[in-house]
Amino acid sequence: MFKISKKARRLSEEEKLQYKKDGYITGLPVFDTQAKEDLNDLFISLSSRLTNDIDINQTNMWHKASLKFYNLCRTPAILDYVEDLLGPNFFQWGGQFFLKEPRDGSVVPWHQDAQYWPLTPAKSVTVWLALYDTDEQNAAMKVVKGSHNEGMFKHHTNKASNLVLDQEVSEEQIKQEDIISLNLKAGEISLHDDGLLHGSEANNSNRRRCGVTMRFAPVNVKADLSIWPHFETQHARGVDDFNYNPVAEIPRGEGTPVKKFQYSREFIEQW
């Protein structure tokens, strides 16, 4: 277990109201500064399993494959923050790295997560854990404050090779005055609503930028399996009285996802 920051806490009522109004909270302490080395070691340990032809940004499902990753997502301080937004009963359904190596040119276009996710109702919360210090120089995530309250924005397809995602919202739809950079120290997290417009620019610094995303949703959220047949949940807290979705087995060892969508059963032989 990584050393937890003594500043880790619960959300204040003001922060809960801010999340509802603005769609995000940032700078929340989770891990102690001494955990920087451990976070780096985790990234190196997991990412080094991938061959050079696989882009780590296109591998989801780490929470279903790797016990190390799964345990990171079960850090009590992280689940406390999520519970303060979602209530006591929720599951995890996603776990991914978003990596930008120095000057690699990759860009995450402006988008809303809910555009990609056939989930009803749309209530997912994303945890973005900084593995390294992340700021505007090395392409911190940027959000458009309050945009989650404006419904779905028009997305178009862009297949440019430097884009991490292929759906984007055009610049003319973005309120420039509402753009906020979610700068984080290693071991801190931000939380954002699935309807919030966000993206990130190219990393033009000499420093690596990498975050772990963890996707959580209340137990009354249901996936459209005709669109997302690989969707599976893992219990996070509370109880699931709905049982709407397939359940993924908790990893018993260290498997490695090699593509965006995989069933949990695909990792069993690797454990």
Image (cartoon, rainbow, N blue to C red):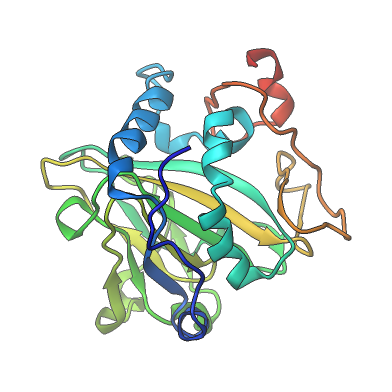
Q: Inspect this view and state whether residue 114 appears.
A: no
Front residue of this view, candidates 163 and 181: 181
Q: Residue at x 83, y 57 (%)?
A: 240
Can you give x and y, in whole percent of width and height, for residue 13 in the image? Answer: 52, 84
Can you give x and y, in whole percent of width and height, for residue 92 in the image? Answer: 65, 50
Q: Inspect this view and state whether residue 27 appears.
A: yes
Viewed as shown, does residue 115 lie left or right of 245? left
Viewed as shown, does residue 215 lie left or right of 106? right
Farthest-out residue, front: 6
Can you give x and y, in whole percent of width and height, for residue 3 in the image? Answer: 40, 44
Q: Quadrant of the C terminus?
A: top right
Q: Is residue 83 above or below residue 77?
A: below
Q: Residue at x 54, y 48 (%)?
A: 75
Viewed as shown, does residue 123 lie left or right of 25? right
Front residue of this view, candidates 12 and 227: 12
Q: Residue at x 70, y 31 (%)?
A: 263
Q: Residue at x 21, y 50 (%)?
A: 202
Task: Tell me how many marks there are.
Answer: 0
Can you give x and y, in whole percent of width and height, for residue 175 in the image? Answer: 31, 81
Residue 90 occupies quadrant:
bottom right
